[in-house]
Structures are given as structure tokens and as C-alpha cells.
Image: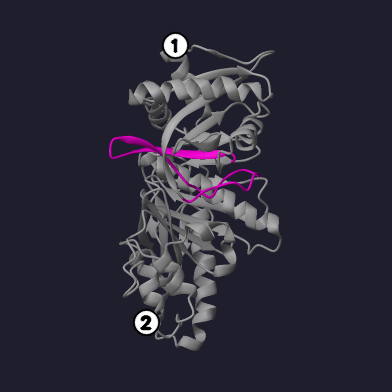
Amino acid sequence: MLKRQNCYLLKKVNDTYWLLPYGQAIADQKKGCQLNETGVFIWQALEHPMSEDQLIQKLAEHYGIEDADRISLSGDIHDFIHTMLQMHFLSETLSPLGLPLLRQMKIADLNVGLYGEPDLFPSDFESFYTETSSDAAFGPTASSDSMSDTAFASGTVSGLNLPQPDQQIEAVPASPSWCPPGQVLIKNRELILYEYEDMYRMLFPEMTNIFEARMTKDGHYVRLYCRKPVYQTENEHIFHAIRFFFLYLAGMHGLFALHSASILYKEKAWLFSGHSGMGKSTHTALWHDLIGTPYLNGDLNLIGIKDGHYQVYGIPWCGTSGIFTTKTYPLGGIILLGRASDDHLETLDDTLKTLRVMQRLISPSWTPEGLERNLDFAAELSREIPIFHLCCTKNPSAVDVVKAAIDKEEGSRHA
């Protein structure tokens, strides 16, 4: 939504109209701007925020412009708005554009709506699409005549009983409008993150087909500006960018991602976590080969509390392993890995447990509030579930040490 910036006043000086700065705009050495008749109409129309499309509609009605001429009008107004945004006369609030709902997926207990053209979203989410949404959009009986774009845009398609999404992600195959610099929170090869009053803006330097993303502070709405993927790597870029948005929303809902590989043992999820190269994949493979434990996820596990119990939720992101599940399992415990010349367990005090678990969380800690959420969750988790510190080799004997500890822990719980 477009809105007028404060600290500018529209005044007629002799026979011309000017936007003149006052107050803080003068202190910031902003300049005035002369407006023609159309510019005056736009400024006055934006007394109440509206979208660019609404503004074009209003102008077309005011000047009696036919539909055939609206393409030219749209281009002219887009250029004018772009200039006004660059000169700080206007600002843009982040809100849905009203693109059609393509698919809806459920990850953990969160519903995520994907809006836009089919070519923009990777197939990696296929296993997490909700059944009704999948059948409606791509099933053999679905037809474009039976479902209106308006219904899809609202997220409530008649007869499908789709819940309102917890997060809306609109993919826009275009360059973004100009945005003033914000406060830099993160800057590295993977992500440049800017904070604004009402949103975050994200640039992904290594993801060449993604121009940028903008997300509301509550994580409910995301607008992803990108180029249609041509190569598989470009599909992967969009897949991994969406992970940032989802994990931010998940943290707001008490769900936290631990960098770890996981297996299913005694009907519970056991998570192996350590720094890169520490051997989490090696250890889960040993369990799988020696004991026959099923794999759950090769790189990332989402943890939360449901009905008073810790759960591990299936998610599509799994690093390069290709190992993931869509199911939810009770959390058994976490094994923190460390290198040693022999295999043994070391005791960690409560503080070290909390800190080491927190360090393995990749849920966003962009702000002090985010860090506190991660720390509080790690502290509570460390109090409630077993945390083992395995100093180990990469030999089968490491399995015997951890298995004995888990069996003893589980035995005492059921005694």
C-alpha cells in the first residue's frame, strides 16, 4: 500500500503546485517538488493509503480513460510512483497484492499459502501440500472455470475448507519498487537483512534469481521478488529462501529448528548435533546400518511442545541429504557430538547444556527478542529432555555407548 510521507505540504504558489518540506524533512535537507495536475490528484488521492492498482483505477475513472489505454497509463503511473518513492515523498506499506492462491502446505501445525505462478515454486514442497488444496489445484476434476481467482486470492476456496494461512508468501516475477536503506541487522555472503518500522527486507547475494524479499514484522506476509527459475539451482534458491521466512514465523509460534540429523529409536526421535564435519550424518548412518533405525531428517529438525510434550515435526528442509519425513514424533533426546580418541559420555551442567543447545539452533535471532526466545527455549528444553554429550570416534563403538545410555534413560522413565 502506498502512503504519503509526513513532513510535506501541498501548496499552490502563484499558478503552480509544490510539495514543500517542513519539520524533520527540512532538518534532513529534503527538497521540494513541483507537481502537475496529475501529480496533485495522486497526492490528494493518497490521503488514505491505497495500492498502485487502486490508484490507477481511480485515475482512469477520473479522466475517463478507456481500458485499451490503461497499459500506457499504468506504465506512466508506475514510473511516477517509483520517482516519488526514491525522493521519499511516498512510502510503501507491506500488504498482500491479491495474487491467486496456488497451493497451501502444512508444516508442523502452521499453514503456509503460496501465491503466484506455478513456475515460481519448487516441487520440494510437494509432500507437504494439504490434500484438499492439492486436489483442487491439480486434481483430475479441477478446472479453471469452476474456481475464481478472487476465491483463491482470499485463501478460502469454496468447498475446499482450507484454513486461513498463518503465512502468505507471494512470489512476484518482477523487480521490486525502490526502498530506502534500513537498519542493517545482518550482512554476510548468505543474507543481508534490513529492519524497518513495520517490516524486514532481505537480500540474498548468492541467489542470483532472487531480487529481494520483504516480510512483515509478525511474519504473516512475505513478498518475494524473483526471476522465474531456469536451472535447478534457481529452484533451490527459492526453496531455501522460503526456509528463512518459515523459521521466523515458527519461532513466533514456539517452534525452533535445531541443526541436527535424526533417527527413530523406540518410537522417539533422537537428534545428533554438532559443528559442521563433526559426524552427525556418520553417526545416524551407523545407527541405521547396525540397529536398523529409520532416518527422519539429515540436517534440520523442528522442535515444539504439543499437549505438554516435546515433539519433532517433519519439515522439507534437510540440507543436501535428501532425507526428511512429513510425520511428527515424540522427542527422545539430543546427542551433542564432540571428538575424542575413545567413545564416552561427559556430563554437562545445566548452563552448558542450555548454551550448547542454543548455539545449535538456527531459528532467527536477528534481534534481542529473537535471541531471548531461542535462549528461553534451549533452557526449558535442557531441563525437560535428556541431553547427552558424546565424546567419540566415528566407529561402531560410539553406537554402543549412546544406546546403553538411552536404554537406561528410557528404562528409568518407565520404571
Q: Kindly identify the amino acid type of the residue bearing the numbered disc 2.
A: Glu
Contact, mark 1 vs mark 2 (Cβ under 8 Å): no
Q: Kindly identify the amino acid type of the residue bearing the numbered disc 1.
A: Asp
Residue 30 appears in the figure: no
Left or right of 79, for residue 21: left
Say if the magenta span includes residue 112: no
**392 versus 96 height, above or below:** above
Query: Which stretch did the figure color magenta?
Result: 298-326
Left or right of 85, for residue 413: left
**How many numbered callouts?**
2
Q: Residues within 10 Å of mark 2 (few under 14, many from 20)?
A: few
Q: Nearer the viewer, mark 1 or mark 2?
A: 1
**Quadrant in which residue 186 is drawn:** top right
Q: Please provide percent x and percent y for residue 232.
A: 69, 58
Q: Which residue lies at the image location 32% right of the left edge and 75% below the top edge? A: 158
Q: Which residue lies at the image location 39% right of the left edge and 46% below the top edge? A: 198
**59 versus 406 height, above or below:** below
Q: Please provide percent x and percent y for residue 375.
A: 41, 25
Report the quarter where the N terminus lies: bottom left
Disc marking residue 349 = 1
**Please, what secondary structure does the residue beneath circle 2 have?**
helix
